[in-house]
Amino acid sequence: NAGVTQTPKFQVLKTGQSMTLQCAQDMNHEYMSWYRQDPGMGLRLIHYSVGAGITDQGEVPNGYNVSRSTTEDFPLRLLSAAPSQTSVYFCASSSGQLGNTIYFGEGSWLTVV
Amino acid sequence: AQTVTQSQPEMSVQEAETVTLSCTYDTSESNYYLFWYKQPPSRQMILVIRQEAYKQQNATENRFSVNFQKAAKSFSLKISDSQLGDTAMYFCAFMKPGAQKLVFGQGTRLTINP
């Protein structure tokens, strides 16, 4: 079972460059979300989606865009990377029932220089 | 807004000992879920245990159990017979009703020494 797959696992960007972190899940989950994890902090929600065509902002959305054209995919776009976006990014998915298990990808390490 | 606080940045115990990690949270909701996630050095987020707020009984999963005190808004994790593989960051998390969104605490780095 693939579960939640994130690519790339590691990326180095220069300030001002753009890139897309890919996320795919094969569990037919309605909910998908992106979190970032900074040193000394827990994960913080960037954006989330409750289904295809529906997205909303989380706690730290600035500098990121998302779209949800299919149930399976939920890419995260950095339009103009900044050093403050150096972080580990996690994609997650769940079936939408309160308390259901949220499945996380393995994380994508992004460094902006 | 909900907040989750873990007041122990680091803990260290000997193998086979019992250790308790603390977590407090703030919410005005009456129904919600609480979770403990384990993050080993690989960075994978692994669900350890979860608790439903409307259930009085504390959740248990093998060597892992929680002490859920709803009135005190406290949710501690007890690890019995600790093992070297328990070495990891542990995060307490809160789930708001109606959405699959987690609010995390800052984490506790647990080291199990041989």
Image (spheres, coloured by chain):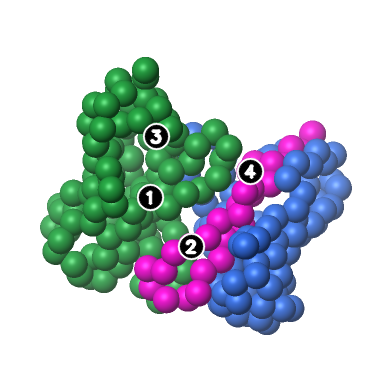
Position above or below: B48 against A53: above
| Tag shown at residue A88 | 4
Mark 3 or 4: the one toward you: 3
Q: Is residue A96 magenta?
A: yes
The residues bearing labels 3 and 1 have C-alpha atoms spaced at a distance of 11 Å
The answer to whether residue B89 shows anywhere in this view is: yes
Mark 4 neighbour density, 10 Å: few (under 14) some (14–19) many (20 or more): many
Secondary structure beneath disc 3? Answer: helix
Chain identifier, blue in the render: A
Q: From the viewer's perspective, is residue A18 above or below residue A3?
A: above
Left or right relative to A28: residue B13: left
Q: Position of residue A58 (x, y in %)?
A: 54, 63
- Which residue is at a point 79% across and 42% down the rendered structure image? A11
Rendered green, the chain in question is B
Cα distance between the residues tagged 3 and 2: 21 Å
Q: Amino acid at mark 3?
A: Asp
x, y percent for residue A35: 57, 54
- Specify the label residue A102 is tagged with: 2
Question: Is A35 left or right of B60, judged from the image as shown?
Answer: right
Which element is circle 4 on? strand
Relative to A80, residue B88 above or below: above
Q: Residue at x 68, y 46 (%)?
A: A108
Instruction: List the residue tagged with mark 1.
Output: B48
Amino acid on which disc 4 is placed: Val
Question: Callout 2: 10 Å neighbours few (<14), some, many (20+)?
Answer: many
Give the label, 2 or 1, closer to the camera.
1
Please tell me if label 1 and label 4 are on a single chain: no
Label number found at residue B86: 3
Q: Which residues are magenta?
A: A87-113
- Both marks 2 and 1 on one chain: no
Quadrant where the image shows the C terminus of chain B: top left
